[in-house]
Image (cartoon, rainbow, N blue to C red):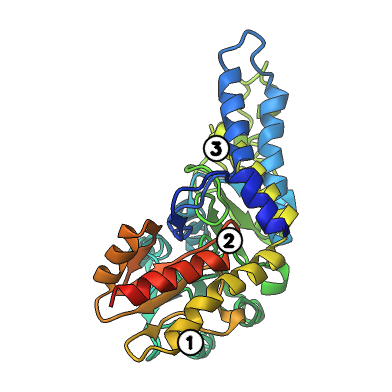
Amino acid sequence: MTPFEAVRAREYPGLDGIFFNAASWGLLPRRTVDAVAELGARRNRWEGFDEAELVGTLARARTAAARLIGATAAEIALAPNTSFGVNLAAACVGQGPPGTILVSAGEFPANVYPWLPLEARGFRVDILPTGPDALPDEERLCTALERADVRGLAVSQVQFATGSRADLGRLGALCRARGILFAVDAIQGLGGAPLDVRAAGIDVLACGGQKWLCSPWGSGFAFVDRALLERFDPPMVSWLAMRSAADFTSLGGYAWEPLEDARRFELATLGIQDHLGLAVSIELILELGPERIHEHLMGVHAPLLEWAESRRDVVMVTPRDPERRAGIVSFRTPDPERTAAALGRARVICAVREGAVRLAPHFYNTADEMRAVVEVLDRSD
């Protein structure tokens, strides 16, 4: 039994149907469900909690997130969603001189809307066209980064519709050389592909936990590079972001002493149960190994890629190169909605995004399940 088969048997017993929709929400491991339920049940017991335990639960989540991306816990701010981190990145850029923010067309709205209010403050948001294959045009992005007025670049680690995986190292190196803030929306990548924020030169990263991290809704985190922690003021302020919050017995001094680490950006009170779930699920992903998960997913994709190669009426949207893929694999048929409906009748859960059928298997899925999907696709002609 492989490690992935063992995890499926232990953490996902009795799966009903073929769940290929981790790009919308990942399945919660049994250990996560149990941990969250136990914490909730303890609220109604006489012994309750002490503050140190609750603070420790949040620290556990920061540590797990930091390990996942090659950061330190001091650079992690817990958050309820991806939008928090993108807004944080936009607020940081907004504290500097006006200029241009670069974004690619085809981005998920959560990675575009937070930047647009900067235009009222003298900034310009330049949404660059995709290439002829509808994928982000990285050559165009790299050329645009040479402009003197560029202040920020916002990209996704993995595109939500196409599944295209960005060359973050290349983009990050150019940003770092020019002093451009590099912000990455990682919600469609982390958990399905490895990422090292140092190697990629990322300044701010945003990631909700509910998709590929298989965590509860309302969980997530932002990474802020340590070099930026004291450079930018928190755009919003929480009482737990102050040093005085270390002593719950004396909170009335109101000394303006923000914490020196990324907790200064957190907004209390955080969902403790949600972030316990985040910690437990990320720890499972770390046990399996992000690199091994990515390798496993490439094997799960293989039957679909072989099928698409044999079909003149099917267009693969997602790049075939494993270095440019993570968990999402999207393809176009003559009638994507009809194709998705046929899959649904066969108890295959997937999605249609931007005119393509999007399959999003995860570590709990198998190549045999993908072969079963291919059989359904052949029958649906």
Q: Say what amino acid the circle numbered 2 marks.
A: Leu
Report if residue 104 is visible in the image.
no
- The N terminus: image quadrant: bottom right
Q: Crowding near pointer 1: few (<14 within 10 Å), some, many (20+)?
A: some
Q: Say what amino acid the circle numbered 1 marks.
A: Ala
Q: Position of residue 342 (x, y in %)?
A: 29, 65
Residue tagged 1: 144
Residue tagged 3: 274
The reply to whether callout 1 and callout 2 are in contact (CB within 8 Å) is no
Q: Is residue 315 left or right of 244 when viewed as pictured?
A: left
* Vertical position of residue 57 compared to residue 154: above or below: above
Give the mark nearest the N terminus, 1 or 3: 1
In the image, 73 versus 327, the foreground residue is 327
- Dot 2 lies on which element? strand
Q: Position of residue 369 (x, y in %)?
A: 51, 64
In the image, 161 versus 66, the foreground residue is 161
Q: Crowding near pointer 3: few (<14 within 10 Å), some, many (20+)?
A: many
Q: Nearer the viewer, mark 1 or mark 2?
A: 2
Give the mark nearest the N terminus, 1 or 2: 1
* Vertical position of residue 363 compared to residue 268: above or below: below
Q: Say what amino acid the circle numbered 3 marks.
A: Asp
Q: Position of residue 96 (x, y in %)?
A: 52, 65
Q: Label 3, label 2: how many angstroms apart (C-alpha)? A: 19 Å
Residue tagged 2: 205
Q: Position of residue 291 (x, y in %)?
A: 70, 68
- Please give the name of the residue rendered at 56% of the width and 65% of the height, measured from the top-left corner: 189
Q: Label 1, label 2: how many angstroms apart (C-alpha)? A: 21 Å
- Please give the name of the residue rendered at 54% of the width and 44% of the height, measured from the top-left corner: 28
Outermost residue toward the top in this view: 46
* Vertical position of residue 17 compared to residue 98: above or below: above
